[in-house]
Image: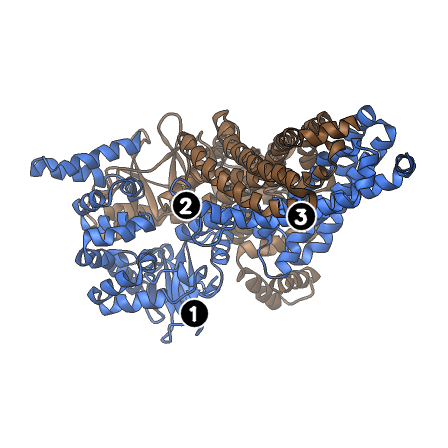
Chain colours: A brown, B blue
Amino acid sequence: MHNETLYHTFLELLKDQFTPEDEKNIIALVQKHHAADLAPVLDQLEMQQAARVLKYMEMPFQAEVFGYLEPSTQSNLVDELGVAHITRLIDVMDADDRVDFYNNLDEEHQQAILPGLAQAEREDIRKLSSYGEGTVGAIMTSDYAALAQNLRAGEALERLRQEAPDKETIYNAYVVDEHRQLMGVVSLKDLILAQPGTLVTDLMNSDVVSINAAEHQSEAARKIAKYDLLALPVINGNDKLAGIVTHDDAMDVAEAEATEDIHRMGGVSPSAPGLGSVNMLEASTWMMVQKRLPWLLVLVFMNIFSGAGIAHFEDTIEAVVALVFFLPLLIDSGGNAGSQSATLMIRALATGRAHLRDWFTLLSKEIGVAILLGVGMALAVSLIGVFRAGPEVAVVVAMTMVCTVLFGSLVGTALPFVLSRLKLDPATASAPLVTSIADIGGVLIYFSIATWVLRDIIAAAGAA
Amino acid sequence: MHNETLYHTFLELLKDQFTPEDEKNIIALVQKHHAADLAPVLDQLEMQQAARVLKYMEMPFQAEVFGYLEPSTQSNLVDELGVAHITRLIDVMDADDRVDFYNNLDEEHQQAILPGLAQAEREDIRKLSSYGEGTVGAIMTSDYAALAQNLRAGEALERLRQEAPDKETIYNAYVVDEHRQLMGVVSLKDLILAQPGTLVTDLMNSDVVSINAAEHQSEAARKIAKYDLLALPVINGNDKLAGIVTHDDAMDVAEAEATEDIHRMGGVSPSAPGLGSVNMLEASTWMMVQKRLPWLLVLVFMNIFSGAGIAHFEDTIEAVVALVFFLPLLIDSGGNAGSQSATLMIRALATGRAHLRDWFTLLSKEIGVAILLGVGMALAVSLIGVFRAGPEVAVVVAMTMVCTVLFGSLVGTALPFVLSRLKLDPATASAPLVTSIADIGGVLIYFSIATWVLRDIIAAAGAA
């Protein structure tokens, strides 16, 4: 396996028993790999070993690999590598990776590192780390290419050529006025194709899609996906260009957002420390319990209402025990249909394929769908009902099926909208929550219908 | 609202009552918008109107907007626009948008369009449409920039400059040998920074991350995300460069994959016609029923086993009716814990944060987590148990809680692995499926424990 090979190459390096010529070859071999492949193997080494392997790599590459390491490895390496080495690393790192690393350090290490940095970098870290978690500002980079509005294409190209090594991308350059307000965007492609004498303002597209630094990260990912952008310029409160979000960071955000939604839908709270970014293999048992127990307890207490509902109908159950056979089937069916509705709705809201204003249309449509589903399932169970418990119970079961499926589906459809409206995450309408609500409804519907349809049998049993 | 404004601008255009000067202004205004913003508004117009508005736009832009339209709108526009106009559009469209459009047409329209196309385009469509749905080949584009290995940086730049208008991206160019085998990748940035006389083979990175055209799309998206690529080169069966997948298409794939997984986890079958790409508002009632009913029926039949389990313990229930109060609570708790486990596991497998080989580690860890969860929940319910039904029933309920939560969690953890192993999608281990399996286990566990713990009470009731 690929990783195995790398692991053994690293162990080879650590042996320290080779000629300078061998050493050069091994390092060249290592550096032929992509930083994204090297980092996970370093994550698995002991910190002292990881530090030694890292130090063998040449400098810009070393910083790149460091940027791909798990946050916990990065923090642990600070002491192993020493503050002097770390400041050299930080110097070469991308602005956004740098601030992510800095934010993950404890205060003591932050204070140890700051004095060694150049004024500009200190300032940059201070600015970027001032944005709240989850905001666009927290993932943007300040390594973007900006052009003054009076430049011509030839001059602009020359400028980009000089700045290229320090920028995340030079394929999009942003034209700004003297107050650093964003005037337009020009692509490297346009600059190359243009006559050198053309003004960049004549080449630029002035209808720039941009985003405010205070907005939510997911919005940046959505815009980059929608407009097929390489990078999205970020504006701060004063309407000035503050940074860019690049397509690769947007993809990471989209993945993390999807994970968060999925966890929430499964009834796992995604609050910090986020499991989305933590390796399942690394998460401690206690961390997992903390993430799962609260929701489970909430659901336990909700289910007590189902129990109370059943207790209320004790006479009905004692008269016709066969009703209990169908209890899991009926309440589960409502919950299952509801989980489906909630899943569809949550995802449609998250991807922008449905909006809050569509709730009425979608709810009316859901009623039609749910009735058809309920009738289909009722036909299926009534056969079993007749066979197992006679025609009266079969009628009760079939009627209940239609009603519980309808009830569950409406809960599943409406709950995400209600949560959205209350500015809560619609994904909190998890399958377990919808199931629990559908259960309470299902119990009440089932035994109410049963008590009414079977009233003669129950009365006879009571008299006996 | 933004879209409202556009809608009214379109209606203005359709009135046809303006001077040529006005017309130019309106069109300029329309074309200031991003094609991704215009397309959804056109989707809402009647086909005849959409065709007229589209025709007002200038040609390369018109093709871009056409590429963003819903597949159904595209198909409907063929007749409105006429074959001659459509062939002109196709001529300008990106190769991958073109083939997507072509594949969506019925055979009759495909046959009508083909003769009007140039030989090269016909050949290109034929090649690209030969890849199966879901494969990398089906989303790649043939509009990539290739460079011969004997070129120098200056010549390569000149070549890219000439080809730029026809290529999806010129920011990455692929160096190929005389057999079109991929030798390396060189970025436009490197070419610009290099001395014009340098050979591209000296500039290129020869450790290219690439993918086979027959692999699954999601693998392409994963590679682009992992290595932060702008584009990923695609190799066909003969090891030749066949195309590229660009970062924006990868992002669309990742979103569609996440939607598909989420739907599957919610018990909605994501089979064609995919809801992932269909607007919820547009999906017909019947389409929704088809997507949801099959799974619900499967679950109904699974739940019959729960019913059969209960029937088996009829004597126990008749002796202690209070047991029924706790039935929904206990079986739901197992299902809820199982849904959590399945959700965590499915997502970890999908994002590559867990692998098939980790099953043993993750399962052993899950046992620890589940026991802690079960004990926590047992403590919560035993209080209610004592209060509502006395100490004996409370003991039964507490013991059952630990066992069902453990059972549900193990099912939720193991099922995604088993499905993966069987080459099935782990996301099929949906919350409803896990819940249903947990229910069957829960019923058997609950009444078995009850029958054993309460054996004296049951015997007394039987004698009475």
Whether pointer 2 and pointer 3 mark residues with C-beta atoms closer than 8 Å, the reply is no
The CA distance from mark 1 to mark 2 is: 34 Å
Residue B424 falls left or right of residue B55: right
| Near-viewer residue (A211 or B156) | A211
Callout 2: 10 Å neighbours few (<14), some, many (20+)?
some
Residue at disc 3, secondary structure: helix
Q: Which mark is residue A167?
A: 2
Amino acid bearing label 2: Lys
**Above or below A458: residue A392:** below
Of all chains, the one bearing label 3 is: A
Which part of the image, by quadrant, shows the C terminus of chain A? top right
Callout 1: 10 Å neighbours few (<14), some, many (20+)?
some
Mark 3 — residue?
A387
Of all chains, the one bearing label 2 is: A
Residues tagged by mark 2 and mark 3 found on one chain of the structure:
yes
Residue A274 in view of the camera: no
The CA distance from mark 2 to mark 3 is: 74 Å
The CA distance from mark 1 to mark 3 is: 58 Å
Mark 1 — residue?
B236
